[in-house]
Amino acid sequence: MNTYITAAAFGLAATFATTATAEVIHATWGGGGARKLEEYVQKPFMEKTGVDARVTEVPNTAGAVRSPTASQYNAVTVTFFEGVGLSGTDLLQGFTDEEIPEVKNLPPEVVIRNDEGLIVGIPTYFSYYGIVYNEDLADAEDFKSWKSLADPKWKGKLAITRPVYAAAYDLTMYAHAAGGDAANIEPGVDILKGLISNSLTTYTSLAHMNTLLGTGEVTAVPFYSTRVWQLQNEGQDNIKIAIPEEGGLMLAYAVVSPKGSGNREETAKYMNYLASAESQVSVSVHGGGIPTNNTAQLPQEYLDTLGTTREELMKKMYIPDWKTVWDNHEDRINMVEQMMSQVGN
């Protein structure tokens, strides 16, 4: 009898210990974004729900999801097109709409679902891809079209990203600008070849590109709106971004949950908080992004730093068929690598 009671008590204590130590571990890229996630998302989440959460930094988030040890993470931030690609695998946990009720406030086209219709990726905010330029060397009128990147007058004055991103972002955007789309990228090839020919360098990191723009070594580059906001926030007022007449490429960032990770209920609460207006406004205001939650109200002071509204930006965004982009990604990386090797910089 005493042995039974002792064993039962031990089991009960173990249950309480497991509950007490349950936490959500969120893997993301290292640097300022990870610190902001911890400060402006996880702290309010823990205060609101009582669920513990912490950030861990990894160099390759999509790689972390594919790793045999992926289940050590409850949530992982990935680029949207990587999330779409992962949705077709058996690597992600699926959640119902009832588990993540905030999904009703998200645009359906940016909620990542698997073949069963379950939610496997929550878009937490978006930035966009435009043409970023040093205002001392050029102005917005120079970049009214993405086609301007191929103008020979920019020879040696532009920069380009690595093939893995040029294949997904640049080629897709240029195809749209020239009358094609995600499935028909041929119309964009000449623009990309022109950019490659005009590029002084292939930048290897965001910090590298920040330096090249700030010093004026590079006049312009297809780049991210969040980076411009951060540079301006740090006092580099001469760095601007142009949205060409064909639009900017909308780039949402998604959070997925690797299959097999524990604490499902806590993870669902966390994913739901990431989808909420409260969380998305906070992460946007402190990182230069735009909420995907349709009910989010950005403070006027922040809108002033953007110089526009969410509604106006949405009208200018191009959202391609990311599934098609992903399905052709490897072939297009090879194509871009060949183009870079053939066209002199």
Image (cartoon, helix red, strand yellow):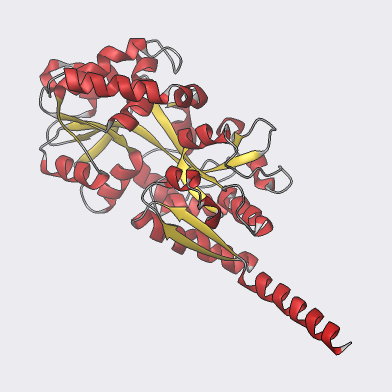
Q: Is residue 182 left or right of residue 279?
A: left
> 64 or 48, which is in the foreground?
64
> 50 or 317, which is in the foreground?
50
| Residue shown at the point (60%, 41%) measured from the top left | 120
Of all residues, the one furthest to the right in this rendering is 1
Q: Is residue 123 left or right of residue 223?
A: right
The N terminus sits in image quarter: bottom right
Q: Quadrant of residue 221?
A: top left
Q: Position of residue 35 (x, y in %)?
A: 39, 61
> 229 or 129, which is in the foreground?
129
The answer to whether residue 148 is visible is: no
Q: Disc count in the image?
A: 0
The C terminus sits in image quarter: top left
Q: Is residue 25 left or right of residue 192?
A: right
Q: Position of residue 251 (x, y in %)?
A: 43, 35
Of all residues, the one furthest to the bottom in this rendering is 2
Q: Position of residue 245 (x, y in %)?
A: 35, 20
Q: Position of residue 280 (x, y in %)?
A: 51, 50
| Residue shown at the point (67%, 40%) measured from the top left | 104
Is 197 situated above or below 106? above
Is 127 situated above or below 17? above
| Residue shown at the point (20%, 48%) measured from the top left | 236
The answer to whether residue 109 is visible is: yes
> 144 or 45, which is in the foreground?
45
